[in-house]
Amino acid sequence: RARSLLQTEQIINGLEPLELVTPRAPEARAGFVAYRVSNASDVVAQLRTHGVFVDARHDILRLGPAPYTTESELERAIDCLRKVLGMGSG
C-alpha cells in the first residue's frame, strides 16, 4: 500500500494541472489515478505507440502503476503523457 501511495502521488504531482478525478487524499485513493481528458481514447492510442499502457473509460484516462514499476518508468510515462497532451515535459 505504501508503494502504491508513493506511485500515485508521483503521478498526481507530475500531471498538474490536469483535472484530477481521483481523490487527492491518500486515505481515499485506490491504486490508480484518473483524469478527465476530452480525447481519452486517442490519448491511450498515442501513448501505446510510446510503450506506455493506460486505459480510458469515456472521457476518463486511468493510470494504474504496477508495484514493480520504477520511479523512472513513471517519470517517462508522465513525460510522454504531458507531450501527447501538449503540456511539454514536467
Image: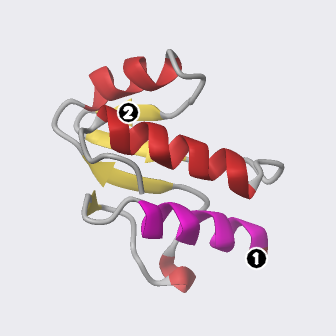
Left of 75 or right of it: where is 11? left
Q: How many marks?
A: 2
Q: Position of residue 84 (x, y in %)?
A: 33, 32
Can you identify the residue that label 2 sits on?
A: 56
In three-dimensional space, the C-alpha distance between marks 2 and 1, rounded to whole angstroms, equals 25 Å
- What sort of colour scheme is used for the picture? secondary structure
At label 2, the amino acid type is Ala
Q: Quadrant of residue 40?
A: top left
Q: Quadrant of residue 22?
A: bottom left
Going 59% across and 52% down the picture, which residue do you hit?
75
**Residue 8 belongs to magenta span:** yes
Q: Position of residue 61 (x, y in %)?
A: 36, 41
Most common SS among magenta residues: helix
**Residue 63 belongs to magenta span:** no
Can you identify the residue that label 1 sits on?
A: 2
Secondary structure under badge 2? strand
Asked if 61 appears above or below 11 in the picture, the reply is above
Q: Residue furthest left?
A: 38
Q: Quadrant of the N terminus?
A: bottom right
Q: Quadrant of the C terminus?
A: bottom left
Going 29% across and 21% down the picture, which residue do you hit?
42
Q: Residue furthest right?
A: 68
Q: Position of residue 50 (x, y in %)?
A: 53, 22
Mark 2 closeness class: few <14, some 14–19, many ≥20 residues within 10 Å:
many
Q: Which mark is residue 63?
A: none
Left of 20 or right of it: where is 81? right
Residue 9 shows in this picture: yes
Going 51% across and 20% down the picture, which residue do you hit?
48
Tell me which segment is drawn in magenta: 3-14
